[in-house]
Image (cartoon, rainbow, N blue to C red):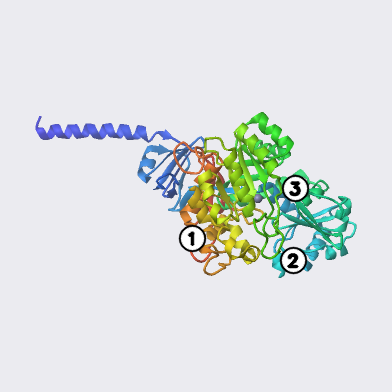
Amino acid sequence: MTKIENKYRFSCLIVILSLTFSSCYKGVNVDLVIHNARIHTMNEKNAVMDAMAVKDGKIIEVGAEQQILNKYQSEKIIDAKGKDIYPGLTDAHGHILSYIHQKLNLDLVGCKSYDEVIKRVEEYQIKKNRKIIIGRGWDQSLWGTNDLPTNDLLNKILPSTPICLYRIDGHAALVNDAMLELAGISSSTKVDGGIIELKENKPTGLLIDNAMNLISKYLPDYPEKEKLTALEEIQNELFQFGITGVHEAGIEFKDIAFFKKYIEKDILKLNLYAMLIASEENIKFAKKNGTFKFKNLSIRSFKVFGDGALGSRGAFLKKHYDDHPGHFGMLTTSPLEMQKVAKLCEDIGYQMNTHAIGDSTNSILLKLYEAVYSKNKDHRWRIEHAQVVDPKEIAWFGKFGVFPSVQPTHAVSDQRWAKTRLGEERMKGAYAYKSLLKSYGMLAIGTDFPIELTNPFLTIHAAVQRKDKNNFPADGFYENEAINLEECLKGMTIWAAFASFDENRLGSIEAGKEATFVIFEKPIESSKAYSENFAWKTFIRGKNVYASDEL
Ligand SMILES: [Zn+2]
């Protein structure tokens, strides 16, 4: 045999061997292969890959086009047509339950005058004929006034039907005299952490913060069927934006059963991280169950309300309101009560997430967390909103290990009046997302829906450009506090996963993690002018839960 013949036979052998090898390699069967994509893994290196393989609801491998196509076979192969894929987005602070109610309540969002509110009440009642009317969404700052309304006009219509109309931020309610009477509220009624507004020693119908609790037990719940329809609508709305997870900021004991029921029926597919309101029943539940997991629902935190909102001047400030001398706002939970919850959380390994808007509340909470934390700093206890922080104390988030959870659309929604309430000096520590990020190193980013819209692209526009949907203001609202696009996306993916202790399961597209991701219609970008974007396809645990082209 010549040398050449020998070489030939040897190469043949290699070809045959490698053919057997590759065909056996190609035999790795998976449930789904996606290729021709730009997969933004959001892993530590922020790598962008072409293709991935999914099996049993998990990501098996992410890699280069040929690497994945050669190695795996599947009955389901999706050509992503070069589109962007991200981990499913998380809204790190939302209220599905309030949104359900908002959908069934009279909708007052966008009313341009008190007269328009009255008109909508009358129209709603003709259609619905409710025994008690509950509405939500009015905002007097859209009526060309800073003053909160009284119920004079409201009393003139439907005098025998109790009416309760919540302000857009949920921190104030305007009720008619029939409602005051039903709840037995008079000028002598006392309430802690709330205000029953009086004029000439008579309630005006305006109830602020804890004063609203006096009426809540008289408000009827809606039929389960109506609630389920609303839940499905909301979930679908979230999927169309690529949102696959929500940190539900405050649930009652009965809501645990509501969520479990629809998870069991495979209707509620979102990843839910639910925070418990610190009620007696919930505390009992937490002590008994510890970290609770039921399929896609996890519970291991308490939500506490530190103060009210800035719009209704309920946020607790160190110095008085610039537009209301002598008024400081107030705490809605006493420091002693907050301390009790903190101790409980520390004992049972729960996370404490406290709503804090005013600089005084933020200060109290930062100090409280630091005092209660045992040596391990990895508590990840959160301050929800962290809206107005004393600039000197922003560094405490990093120093004390307190996770800031923020909603950038609040900044651009409040831009009309925030400075009037706070004055220039305090604005330096208000909606200061860049400074908070610098301090702690991460942000959990959400919307606080239904106070704001669920649309994450409005959040990106607000966080990166510091502008609202109408691109106002032209040069950005305190644009020195803007964060960049990558930081904002991390706040909705991997950092949100950290904020709920889910970083090993969610938040990035990596082998071993849940196959929960979204293919977007257009690349995610941020430019001076707002542009819409939607999910093309949304996947949860490997299943396609939404596809725009099937609509
Ligand atoms: Zn909220």
The amino acid beneath tag 2 is Asp
Cα distance between the residues tagged 3 and 1: 38 Å
Crowd tier of the residue under label 2, counting other residues whose Cα lies within 10 Å: few below 14, some 14–19, many 20 or above? few
Asked whether disc 1 touches disc 2, contact meaning CB atoms under 8 Å apart, the reply is no
Cα distance between the residues tagged 1 and 2: 36 Å
The quadrant of the rendering that contains the N terminus is top left
Question: Could you say where residue 24 lies in the image, as x and y percent from the top left?
Answer: 36, 32
From the image, tell me which residue sits under label 2. Answer: 147
Q: Is residue 336 above or below residue 159?
A: above
Q: Is residue 248 above or below residue 522?
A: above
Task: Residue 518: tell me if it is visible.
Answer: no
The amino acid beneath tag 1 is Ser
Question: Could you say where residue 334 lies in the image, as x and y percent from the top left?
Answer: 71, 45
Specify whether 339 is left or right of 193.
left
- The secondary element bearing badge 1 is classed as loop
Which label's residue is closer to the chain start, 3 or 1?
3
Asked whether 533 or 347 is in front, the reply is 347
Specify whether 152 is left or right of 485.
right
Which label's residue is closer to the chain start, 2 or 3?
2
Question: Could you say where residue 489 lies in the image, as x and y percent from the top left?
Answer: 50, 52
Q: Is residue 25 above or below residue 368?
A: above
From the image, tell me which residue sits under label 3. Answer: 226
